Image (cartoon, rainbow, N blue to C red):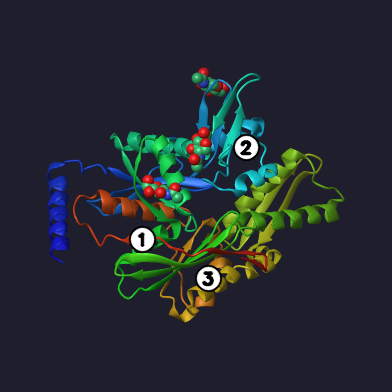
Amino acid sequence: MPYFIIGTAILAVLGYLTQMYGLPPPAPKVVGIDLGTTFSSIGVYHAVTGDTEIIPDDLGKRSIPSVVAFLSNGSVLVGHRAVQQQEKNPLRTIYDVKENDPQFQADQQRYPFAVKLFDNGSAYFDVPLSDSERRIVTPEEVGGIIIRYLKSATEKAQNTPISQLVISVPAEFDEEQRNATARAADFADLETRRIISESTAAALAYGLHKKKGVEHIVVVDLGGGTLDVSVLWLQGGVFVTQAMAGNNRLGGQDFNDRVQHFLMEYIEKKYGKSVTDKEDLQQLRLAIEEAKIHLTSHLKAKITLHLKNLESFSYELTRTEFESINADLFDHVTEPIKAALEDAKITPEEVDEIVLVGGSTRIPLVRKIVGSFFGQVPNYGIDPELAVVTGASVQAGVIGGGWPLQVAAMELPSKQRKKHIYAGKKEI
Ligand SMILES: *[C@@H]1O[C@H](CO)[C@@H](O)[C@H](O)[C@H]1NC(C)=O
Ligand SMILES: *[C@@H]1O[C@H](CO)[C@@H](O)[C@H](O)[C@H]1NC(C)=O
Ligand SMILES: *[C@@H]1O[C@H](CO)[C@@H](O)[C@H](O)[C@H]1NC(C)=O
């Protein structure tokens, strides 16, 4: 591998010069972006140190909600700022955007904002700015606004313009949806160097493309509302998606809803009062989310609330209780894993590496369930919410490095269709 050795030598010299003369290392030119339906983030790969860096926005957040708000005076808010004003501005705050998704308009009743269709069948948002003024916005433009926001945070942090990106998309995205994602990047004046599947990105984040003897990889992504499983086949640095399965009614929100239900019943039984006030409910929801996170590293979490007609209330939720309240939901975790393995025609024993992605894989029981299903410990050291952007940044580093840094991973297009599983009921 002479190129590799030369590359390493250049890196060593560069690292030496950097240290000796305090020369700044070259700023990465290509960024990696995870443009997710609920959260998005951006990162870069530093060639000299081999580190990936996920860039925070000016609020210090490395993962921003994929939410965009349009104000009547023409200002546009992105991320946490958009979420903060969402309740006051529901018709102009757009979230949950999927590029080129035919289901989007059909799901209109789930959203407070207006989703309509152009004559050619593609969806757009009809945003009322004032009584007389509207703004027509396409999903690509919304994606572009989020990308531009992330890009500008990176340009500020590095004091250097960015012109190219590697962007990740859900594995099941077809060519048209991938093209739509590239058009979103166009809106942010970024050239798309490569589009990679989220599952491939997660595998890259753990360096599995460089690991010897790895052939079959399973990526389990359990987020706020969906569970996605991909089976990847890795051969000579090339990733191919062999099978995909998912349950889009299973995730962190469902666990929270169960706990909320449980606590509301408890309060009703103990005090004979029901929690109905909007602010009380919001307080309850936030406290539950906090408790759930606390329970990922502790065995108990204290939930303290100051409800309007009840003064202060507190409850100590144990991890065991959290697990039993959600027991049947956790049982569903292995269903798409089984379906995907079946599709890929491999057994759990044949799987070489398992990668966990998505915030809900922080729940110890989820890691345990997946681990015992495969009989091996899954990869989970990287922040599961940042694994995808980390992998996209590694790929960006390979493309933007200018010298052969490492084995460049490739991804071949997949013809596989995703199997959808809803709470035990199989739909294809
Ligand atoms: C629009 O209104 C927001 C909030 O009221 C304010 O922060 C922003 O500066 C205004 N933008 C312009 C262009 O006036
Ligand atoms: C459909 O029409 C709209 C508005 O003319 C355009 O912006 C969009 O790109 C078109 N979509 C496709 C898939 O051609
Ligand atoms: C996607 O874009 C490529 C390159 O611009 C083009 O060749 C291809 O036909 C497009 N595919 C679809 C389905 O729109």
Give the numbered dot on residue 198.
none
Position of residue 12 measured from the top left corner of the image (x, y, whole percent) = 15, 55
Please rate how many residues cluster around mark 1, counting C-alpha atoms within 10 Å: few if below 14, some from 14 to 19, many from 20.
Answer: some
What's the residue type where badge 2 is placed?
Lys
Q: Is 376 placed left or right of 270 in the picture? A: left
Q: Residue at x 36, y 69 (%)?
A: 234
Instruction: State yes or no: Cβ of the residue under disc 1 lies below 8 Å from any atom of ligand 3.
Output: no
User: Label 1: which residue?
Assistant: 411
What's the residue type where badge 3 is placed?
Ala
User: Label 3: which residue?
Assistant: 340
Residue at the farthest right position: 272
Q: Is 179 placed left or right of 325 in the picture? A: left
Q: CA distance from mark 3 to mark 1?
A: 19 Å
Position of residue 22 measured from the top left corner of the image (x, y, whole percent) = 16, 41
What's the residue type where badge 1 is placed?
Glu
User: Label 2: which residue?
Assistant: 116
The image quadrant where one finds the N terminus is bottom left
Q: Residue at x 30, y 73 (%)?
A: 212
Q: Residue at x 59, y 59 (%)?
A: 295
